[in-house]
Image (spheres, rainbow, N blue to C red):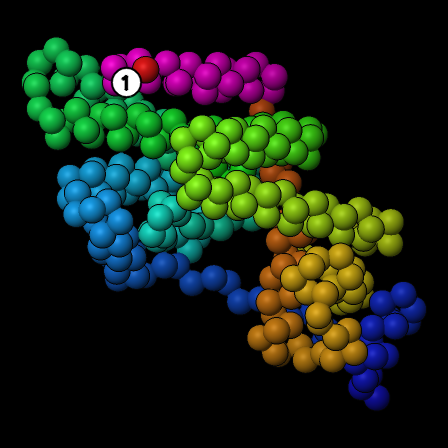
């Protein structure tokens, strides 16, 4: 006899489940090139309006972001990621997407580095050329754009590339580093808001604070699930029906976005349940396989710090 939803929930800590309880999460579809083109045109159009019709600046920014995201995309393609794509977000930039199971520290670190580092190299070359060989305003603007935008992405702030790279390199200290860098970043942003009276920067502080709060809730769910005996170091696809039920209960309890979900109302095929299942998938996302030694990490950190020296080539220090 098929169980009622409330029986299935209580079974999370009791009898085994015979009915399907865990939604099947279909693999994400790759982003269409048409969607990429449309998002880029929208990014340019809105940026053109916001920047008071300064066409040169918005084109420079668009080129820099496109090259940056292509770097991520090519690295993911090299490591056999699936569902690759790029999209642009007005006011914020762009994003390269892809997925892969059983990723390693080395692979994920290189994917993060492949966005900003090529841009910094390109910007440095353009800066030298514009300083010593060809005096050209567009060339100078491109060099500044490539260097500053990519250096900003290397700041140790989540979800910027620098913050995500540091977290991957130091998995054992991930939570502590995230908290420290996020608090320092918020403090720095508030200082610049007060000093320059540029209140739009508060948006970035709010995003960082929101990410910090969400990560705290996810870590709490993982901690409680571990106490419940649920295997948390696994992907969603390996999660048993029973463990999914318990994960569902704890996510509704501790993640604010799902507090209004009714535990007694359950439909495995509903969009609402699949949204919850997707959140559980992200909470249980297993850490990358450790394959970087101390010396490899040290070299990456040295290169990361040294890259900030490129700002001197712009002449704007």
Going by the image, does 257 lie left or right of 33? Answer: right
Residue range (magenta): 293-315
SS assignment for the magenta stretch, majority = helix
Q: Residue at x 33, y 52 (%)?
A: 90
Quarter of the image for the C terminus: give it: top left
Going by the image, does 221 lie left or right of 103? Answer: right
Q: Residue at x 60, y 20 (%)?
A: 293
State whether residue 230 is above or below residue 110.
below
Q: Residue furthest bottom?
A: 1
Q: Nearer the viewer, residue 20 or 123?
A: 123
State whether residue 80 is above or below residue 10.
above
- Residue 56 in picture, x, y percent from top left: 15, 39
* Residue 168 visible in the current orientation: no
Q: Residues within 10 Å of mark 1 (few under 14, many from 20)?
A: few
Q: Which residue is mark 1?
A: 316
- Residue 267 in picture, x, y percent from top left: 68, 80
Q: Residue at x 83, y 79 (%)?
A: 6
């Amino acid at each position: 006899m098929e169980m009622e939803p409330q029986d299935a929930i209580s079974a999370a800590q009791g009898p085994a489940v015979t009915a399907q309880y865990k939604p099947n999460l279909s693999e994400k579809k790759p982003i269409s090139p048409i969607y990429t083109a449309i998002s880029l045109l929208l990014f340019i159009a809105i940026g053109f309006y916001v920047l008071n019709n300064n066409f040169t600046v918005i084109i420079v920014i668009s080129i820099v972001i496109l090259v940056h995201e292509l770097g991520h995309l090519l690295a993911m393609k090299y490591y056999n990621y699936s569902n690759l794509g790029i999209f642009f977000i007005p006011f914020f930039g762009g994003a390269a997407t892809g997925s892969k199971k059983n990723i390693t520290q080395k692979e994920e670190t290189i994917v993060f580095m492949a966005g900003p580092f090529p841009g910094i190299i390109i910007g440095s070359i353009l800066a030298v050329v514009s300083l010593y060989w060809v005096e050209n305003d567009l060339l100078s603007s491109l060099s500044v754009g490539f260097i500053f935008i990519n250096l900003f992405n290397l700041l140790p702030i989540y979800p910027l590339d620098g913050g995500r790279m540091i977290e991957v390199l130091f998995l054992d200290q991930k939570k502590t580093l995230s908290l420290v860098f996020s608090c320092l970043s918020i403090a720095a942003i508030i200082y610049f808001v007060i000093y320059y009276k540029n209140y739009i920067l508060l948006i970035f502080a709010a995003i960082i604070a929101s990410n910090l709060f969400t990560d705290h809730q996810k870590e709490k769910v993982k901690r409680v699930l571990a106490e419940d005996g649920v295997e948390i170091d696994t992907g969603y696809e390996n999660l048993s029906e029973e463990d999914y039920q318990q994960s569902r209960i704890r996510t509704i309890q501790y993640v604010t976005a799902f507090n209004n979900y009714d535990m007694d109302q359950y439909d495995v095929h509903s969009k609402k349940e699949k949204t919850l299942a997707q959140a559980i998938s992200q909470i249980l996302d297993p850490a990358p396989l450790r394959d970087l030694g101390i010396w490899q990490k040290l070299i990456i950190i040295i290169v990361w710090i040294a890259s900030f020296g490129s700002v001197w080539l712009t002449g704007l220090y």
